[in-house]
Image (cartoon, rainbow, N blue to C red):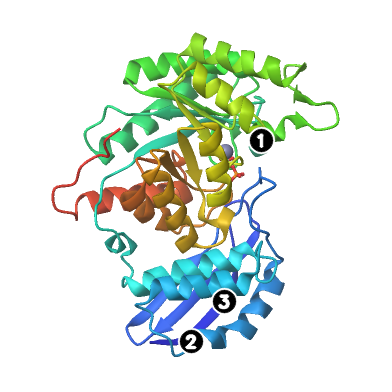
Amino acid sequence: MIKDITGFKIFNSRGEPTILIRTTTDRGTFYGSAPSGASVGRYEAKTLNIEKSLRILRRIKVNFIGLREEDFEVLDEMVVQLAGENFENIGSHLGFALSSSFLKAATLNEPYTYFKSLSFPYPIGNVVGGGKHGGGTDIQEFHLIPTKVKSIEEAVWTNIEGIKRIKEELSKLGKLYGKNDENALVSDLDDEKTLEILSKVARELDAKIGIDVAAGELWDHKKGKYVYRKTNKELTPVEQLDFMKELINRWNIYYVEDPFNEDDFKKFSELRKWRKRILICGDDLHATNVKRLKISIKYDACNSTIVKPNQIGTIGSAIKFSEFANENGIKTVLSHRSGETNDWIIADLSLGLSPFIKTGVWGGERLAKLNRLIELWHRIEKPRMAKL
Ligand code: PGA
Ligand code: ZN
């Protein structure tokens, strides 16, 4: 039975305030904390100021006290009901942190036990960054994706070895400037030169390449063009489509996230029809929202989707979204946010729901998720990587 719920202000990896929730039950004390995005899509659940959220918590917690913590779905649905249509009543930080602590309370701090069938996700590792996360490229993220590995440890190692080699290459060129919000490397090389280095290292390690264009951030609504500031070019949607095809062909890209802005289902579907065997992934396009995924399916816009629980507000809604995607043959990518805490719950969720997990490659808040996966690999009977 839930005895008390308390909230605290803590700070995320970018130094922004966020929420830590402590739920106390007869069986123990369970914590959940919320991440935050920087390249936030238009269709995400609303966020509120943290002080305000903590005041709201003090007001609404009576609704939960005395209820059974085993009934995770009931508690999560109550959060959704209290939140209002777009989370304007409680904010998504509070929604995420509450539902996370509830799932931990229901499973005695082992959220992966919530799921029947478990397989380990392939980590999509952000190795070079730009865009809104800081860095020289217009494309927001460049990924290594080790899909041929036999264990999660090998997968994590491949991405770490990969980022070390890329770091060395950038150093040799005198183009390494540091790390960004997600601990991806920052240089002032442009998109194509970055892909050249990435592709060399990917070949050496037998890994695949991905990009998150985060094209919503490049899209200038007034001009009706994608504006590439670093390389000084402006592309119409048709030119953007051609540019994406060119990059995919030249660099043999396997995973492309948000190649167009979040309203252009049509262009997504044109790219998807052109090359069926690679992953075209919607992040801001879907915003972890079943209604938006249904539109996407109608257009055949994507065969893959990002799942970010704080985009839809609660863990329970993100689980429903993932299950709906899985039923419709859409590959899910459980994703961190650029501003993270050391909470690892998305690792447990990915084990039950997704063939991929997207996190950074190193840095404490990113490794918290990856190391949790390694820990679970050694705990679960007959662990196996997901089928692709
Ligand atoms: P965000 O970036 O967490 O800043 O939104 C991640 C992404 O766009 O995938
Ligand atoms: Zn994205």
Taking the spot 58% from the left edge, 28% from the top edge, the residue there is: 268
Please determine whether, in this image, residue 31 is positioned above or below residue 371.
Answer: below
Mark 3 Cα shell of 10 Å, populated few (<14), some (14-19), many (≥20): many
Indicate the amino acid at tag 3: Gly
The amino acid at mark 2 is Asp
| Residue 324 showing in the rendered view | yes
Check disc 1 and report the residue beneath it: 134
Say which element carries label 2.
strand
Q: Nearer the viewer, mark 1 or mark 3?
A: 3
Q: Which residue is mark 2?
A: 4
Q: Nearer the viewer, residue 134 or 63?
A: 63
Taking the image as shown, residue 286 lies to the left or right of residue 222, namely left
Residue that carries the numbered disc 3 in the rendered image: 7
Foreground of the two, 194 or 386: 386
Give the farthest residue toward the right.
Answer: 222
Give the image location of residue 205, x and y in percent.
33, 21
Of pointers 2 and 1, the one earlier in the residue sequence: 2
- Badge 2 local density, few (<14 within 10 Å), some, or many (20+)? some
**Where 272 sits versus 1, above or below?**
above
